[in-house]
Image (tube, rainbow, N blue to C red):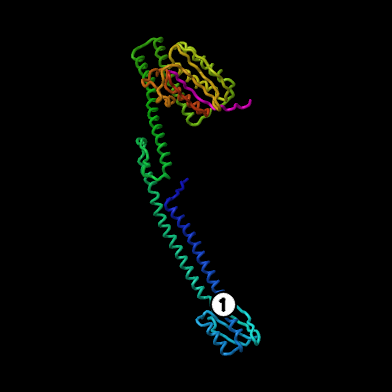
Amino acid sequence: MRAMHAGSLGRRLARWLALLALAGLALTCLGVYTATSLSLGERQAETLRQKQLQVRHLVAEAGVLGSGALKHKLDDALVGRQDLALVLTDASQQVLYAGPAAPPGRRTLVTRFEVAAATGPVRATLTLDASEDDRVLRRLARTLVAAALAGSIVIAAGGFTLVQIGLRPVRDLAAQVQTLAADTLDRRLDGSDQPEELAGLIHHVNELLRRLHRAYAQLEGFNADVAHELFTPLTTLIGGTEVALRKARDAIELRDVLGGQLEELQRMSLIVQDMLFLSQADRGAQARREDVSSLAGVATAVAELHEAAMEEAGLRWRVEGDARGAVDVRLLQRALSNLIGNATRHARPGSEVEVRIESVEDWVKLRVVNEGSTVAPDHLPRLFDRFYRVDTSRSGADRNHGLGLAIVAAIARMHGGRVAADSRGGITSVGLDLPAVAAAAG
């Protein structure tokens, strides 16, 4: 399906601005036209009313109807008013006075009234020619329509120009973003000359670039570590096989060679399995939960499996505290095994490895604590990175491939939890916090 294109923001804003301007100007022009029309109507009505009063007064004061004096006064009253026409008739419909009539085909306003005279009532018909006012209104309407259209065009053009000027910082940011590539993620967007409306966006984009740069660096390091971890056993396998093939060997010697190669193959298999597990966790795999009444019992069972290794290292162990939780027992056992194994490798001989379990508000905290060398603060946030080792010399790589604590972090995420590490005064505490989810009734 073809993606819909939103079009130019500048043209879209200019169009809407033109429509709004046209609507505003149209309403304004309509208001002007309506007010003018009403004003002309009121003036016409007032003219008819004034002339009606004048005619009443002149007829009433005339002693004899039809005399030259009345006609003269009526003519004087209508001088300069070509838009007015007056007709007077008596009760027998005899015309007593008739002024110039309005031309045909024009709109007129007519008012009829009676005037009491000495010889009887007089009927008057007063006609006002409104065609001139109509012509003024038509001219005004054409002028207002032209002004509204011209104003809308001017506002649209000015609005488009202003929008283009206003969007210049956005285009500058787009140009900066286009210069970014995988090898330039360490750059940051320059927001020094940007308006404050874009400050939040620039801040978030720079934070995103910082995380991407770190993730890209971690990915490069991860690829190098994977290559190193797999290269070592592969080299051992190839070298052992070449040595075995150089001369004839008896079954016992071949069994020893195959045994060593099997250990390397098993080590490679563990690395691949751990990487597959981490990949599943990264894709959002969730832990299956079951009600566990005693997490201390789970920790004790795991510690007993490491008892031989701890005795060999001259260590003691104990489990302190207990809690109930809804967890995936198999995954929790794996996490505790990795934590205890990590503590066993780094604990001072003759000390004690302690598994602490406690409930704090809505969390169940599991910590494995050992005495040994203090981990520097800059190493603590990266302890749970894949293949990360505080000891860059990779000592002990034959026993530990650097994915143990990364798996602990993945198991914590699968439970909706988090990991924690602290080291001070020779006491190191590493563990995970799991949400205290109520177990389903069963």
**Picture coordinates of residue 174, whole percent (x, y):** 38, 44
- Check disc 1 and give the amino acid type: Gln
**Picture coordinates of residue 30, whole percent (x, y):** 51, 64
Which residue is the site of mark 1? Answer: 50
**Picture coordinates of residue 39, whole percent (x, y):** 53, 70
Horizontal side of 131 relative to 198 (left or right) equals right
Task: Say which element carries label 1.
Answer: helix
Q: In this rendering, is residue 311 above or below 289?
A: above
Q: In this rendering, is residue 241 above or below 289?
A: above
Q: Which residues are magenta?
A: 426-442
Say if the magenta span includes residue 189: no
Quarter occupied by the C terminus: top right
- Dot 1: within a 10 Å radius of its alpha carbon, few (fewer than 14), some, or many (20 or more) residues? few
Q: Is residue 385 visible?
A: no
Query: Who's the residue at 38% across and 28% down the image?
Result: 221
Q: In this rendering, is residue 371 above or below 125?
A: above
